[in-house]
Image (spheres, grey):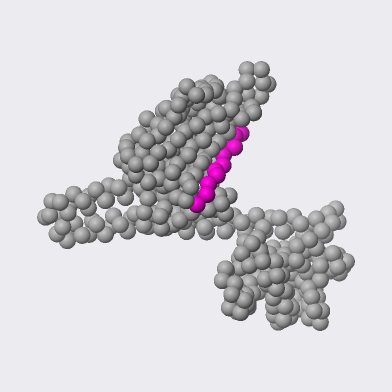
């Protein structure tokens, strides 16, 4: 690879060179990586810091890659996104290229980039870790497919694999944390009881109450995970029936009443104000309402109230659940329906929040082709709402 240019060329500029190499070698090693959290860095630190970061990555590659690559190898940036990079390992002067060799090269490059970015962060004050989507494979020539198309498909596959790996890592990390907290608590109290605390009746009862509470958390967490798994899979059967929303809300209120009573929270709902027929899975929509009510009660102060309002919005029926809690920062609202998302980790852990109830509600509403969202201001409470189409006996598509 030539190290004489000062800026990594665009992919369009090296296509001819790459076509020539592929025509004679039939294949090439392919490395791809791009900055995964670019939007977050831009939003937090501004375009200037981000542009400097990309320039830093560019310079690091130009200075470091010549020690790993040969002159025939090609490095380029995506034509439309300068924070996406491609490296092509040409086999012409190599006896053999193994996939493990390509992986090792990618690993070394990312390791060096992380070192340089860490130093860059110390200088600029950028404390967020720069994350990369990355992958590698072989790229084989095909006379029926253009080089650009080959690269696009290879990148698409590697990007998907990288996102899946990131999701799995994040999911396992979150699940481990969710289970570890109550299990550690249970273990600690059981050990204390075994060491002699059982002889004190009041202490024993208090510890058993805590163990029971933490066990209930584990059971609910497991149930929520199974629900999400079923909803996300193709095995969920929707038992759609013609039902009125009022009956579903009343069913949910009956279920949640003991929880509300513990905090002396009043749930206000005027069933006579507006009602509507819908073609829905009653159990699943009731689950949505329960999850939203549970969330409202959880983050409301004792003695406050939660209001349920049903109204018409075009061809939709809109259900709003409003609490008098601390509210949610506007910047957090787009993410609150994602799994394991909490606005305030410390507060959520104290109140037993798992960050799964809203994700379940979102998936159920979307399976009904509905809309779910929230509006809130810090210190002014929150309103969660969902919209479902009213039943229309004349409509051709009722589902």
Q: Is residue 175 visible?
A: yes
Vertical order, 126 against 239 (above or below): below
Residue at the image position 28 percent from the left and 57 percent from the top: 187
Q: Quadrant of the C terminus?
A: top right
Residue 115 horizontal/vertical position (percent):
60, 77
For residue 352, side relative to residue 53 (left or right): left
Which residue appears farthest toward the top when viewing the image? 394
Vertical order, 58 against 269 (above or below): below
Q: Quadrant of the N terminus?
A: bottom right
Q: Is residue 239 visible?
A: no
Frontmost residue, 68 versus 122:
122
For residue 290, side relative to residue 374 (left or right): left
Residue at the image position 41 percent from the left and 28 percent from the top: 251
Frontmost residue, 18 versus 56:
56
Q: Is residue 32 magenta?
A: no
Residue 2 horizontal/vertical position (percent):
80, 79
Frontmost residue, 312 versus 163:
312
Residue at the image position 45 percent from the left and 41 percent from the top: 323
Vertical order, 285 against 217 (above or below): above
Residue 71 horizontal/vertical position (percent):
79, 79
Residue at the image position 81 percent from the left and 67 percent from the top: 10
Frontmost residue, 11 versus 368:
368
The number of discs equals: 0
Residue 219 horizontal/vertical position (percent):
36, 45
Which residue appears farthest toward the left when viewing the image? 199
What segment carries the magenta color?
Answer: 367-378
Q: Is residue 376 magenta?
A: yes
């Amino acid at each position: 690879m030539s190290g004489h240019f000062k800026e990594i060329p665009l992919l369009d500029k090296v296509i001819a060179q790459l076509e020539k190499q592929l025509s004679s070698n039939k294949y090439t090693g392919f490395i791809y990586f791009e900055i995964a959290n670019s939007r977050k860095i831009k939003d937090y630190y501004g375009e200037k810091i981000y542009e400097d970061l990309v320039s830093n990555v560019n310079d690091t590659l130009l200075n470091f890659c010549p020690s790993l690559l040969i002159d025939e190898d090609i490095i380029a940036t995506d034509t439309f996104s300068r924070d996406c990079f491609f490296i092509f390992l040409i086999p012409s002067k190599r006896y053999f290229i193994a996939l493990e060799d390509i992986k090792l090269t990618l690993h070394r490059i990312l390791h060096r980039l992380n070192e340089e970015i860490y130093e860059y962060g110390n200088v600029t004050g950028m404390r967020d870790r720069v994350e990369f989507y990355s992958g590698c494979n072989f790229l084989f020539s095909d006379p029926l497919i253009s080089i650009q198309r080959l690269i696009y498909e290879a990148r698409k596959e590697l990007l998907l694999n990288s996102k899946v790996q990131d999701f799995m890592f994040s999911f396992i990390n979150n699940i481990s944390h969710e289970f570890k907290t109550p299990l550690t608590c249970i273990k600690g109290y059981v050990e204390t009881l075994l060491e002699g605390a059982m002889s004190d009746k009041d202490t024993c009862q208090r510890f058993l109450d805590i163990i029971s509470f933490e066990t209930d958390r584990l059971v609910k967490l497991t149930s929520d995970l199974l629900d999400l798994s079923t909803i996300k899979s193709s095995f969920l059967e929707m038992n759609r029936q013609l039902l009125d929303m009022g009956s579903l809300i009343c069913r949910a209120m009956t279920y949640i009443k003991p929880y509300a009573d513990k905090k002396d929270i009043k749930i206000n709902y005027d069933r006579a104000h507006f009602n509507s027929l819908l073609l829905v899975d009653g159990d699943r929509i009731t689950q949505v309402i329960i999850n939203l009510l549970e969330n409202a009660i959880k983050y409301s102060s004792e003695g406050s109230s939660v209001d349920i309002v049903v109204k018409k919005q075009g061809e939709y029926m809109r259900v709003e659940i409003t609490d008098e809690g601390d509210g949610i920062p506007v910047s957090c609202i787009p993410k609150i329906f994602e799994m394991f998302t909490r606005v305030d980790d410390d507060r959520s852990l104290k109140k037993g929040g798992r960050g799964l109830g809203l994700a379940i509600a979102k998936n159920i509403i979307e399976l009904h082709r509905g809309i779910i969202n929230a509006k809130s201001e810090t210190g002014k409470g929150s309103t969660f709402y969902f919209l479902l189409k009213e039943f229309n006996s004349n409509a051709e598509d009722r589902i």
